[in-house]
Amino acid sequence: MSEIIKPNTDFTTILDIIEASRRRAMKAVNAELITMYWEVGKYLSSLVAGSSFGDKVIDEVAAYIAKSNPTIKGFNRRGLYRMKQFYETYRYDEIVTPLVTQISWTNHLLIMSGSKTAEERRFYIELCIRENYSKRELERQMDSAYYQRYVLSAGKQLPEQIPEEARGRFLDSYVLEFLDLPEQYSESNLKKAILGNLKNFILEFGRDFTFIGEEYRVQVGGQDFYIDLLFYNRALSCLVPIELKIGKFKPEHIGQINFYLEALDRDVKKPNENPSVGVILCATKDDAIVEYALSRSMSPTMVADYTLQLPDKKLLEQKVREIAMLADGSGDD
């Protein structure tokens, strides 16, 4: 006797199968497209190198394609030059070359035009792959100088209690320009704005963060205590409480987050999960005070500041250059 399908049967599995298949198909099409652009760029690079007319030969190629097959789009002089530039930018980069087919052509163009060094290009390609950025999301990260902020964060001395795998997944400074807050606001306003823009907030922190709740209650000694925001990080397999402060960082904030970390690890964390990592997100901070405050703390805690407007990218680029110069200078001793 055949099984009778009940009217309320959940058929969502078939939608998941279809969607997964579509994603794989799109990735395959994108990989083939990028491979074609790479091969065209390689051909053009060789053609230009052997031509006495230099780049002008690309005009002849574009005219030939337009005449031979007018229906082909994207192979005008500008498009062909970008393919040549694409190939020549990465042909000797053994790290990037195997990765180029994993992101879209649109994102490649953004990275090539918006990055100034090979390191910055490589960073954004790897970030795009890990976070699966759309064009709009990548534009936002580049406008907010995400690479420069990452480099500057990596240069900061972190507490030994921060797990090795967590280093590099947290920034020293976050940009929350999307909150659109007035000049005067409270911690409650800040929290409400974050919850109303949770997708952008997670974009800034990283897609491995999953939101659990606001004003998350932990009970200790018969009393209730509330964590501003609680997230779970899938890559780190740990809970991440975030405490919001609209003023300067104060040493007493460490005691508060340590208390929450202890409560979460004792009563909420599952046996297969790693110890929780805390984040204090404040409007401003003095690095010396932060270092003193964390020096004797046994809990893994990050202290970061935030800004409500896009940073001065040129200023951050200058700071990155200064760090690189100091690093080069130290190697000469």
Image (cartoon, rainbow, N blue to C red):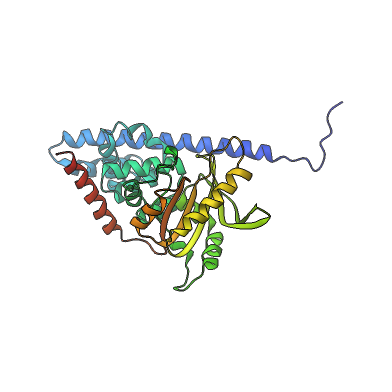
Which quarter of the figure has residue 47?
top left
Residue 282 image offset from top left, x and y in percent: 44, 60
Residue at the far top: name it: 1
Q: Is residue 35 above or below residue 142?
A: above
Residue 4 image offset from top left, x and y in percent: 84, 33
User: Which quadrant does the C terminus fall into?
Assistant: top left
Q: Nearer the viewer, residue 162 or 112?
A: 162
Q: Nearer the viewer, residue 114 or 299?
A: 299
Q: Is residue 227 above or below residue 88?
A: below
Query: Residue at horizontal 63%, vertical 39%?
Result: 16
User: How many marks do you count on the picture?
Assistant: 0
Residue at the far left: name it: 52
Which quarter of the figure has residue 144?
bottom left
Which quarter of the figure has residue 161?
top left
Is residue 23 in view from this perspective? yes
Q: Is residue 317 left or right of residue 267?
A: left
Q: Is residue 20 above or below residue 2?
A: below
User: Which quadrant does the N terminus fall into?
Assistant: top right
Residue 322 image offset from top left, x and y in percent: 22, 51
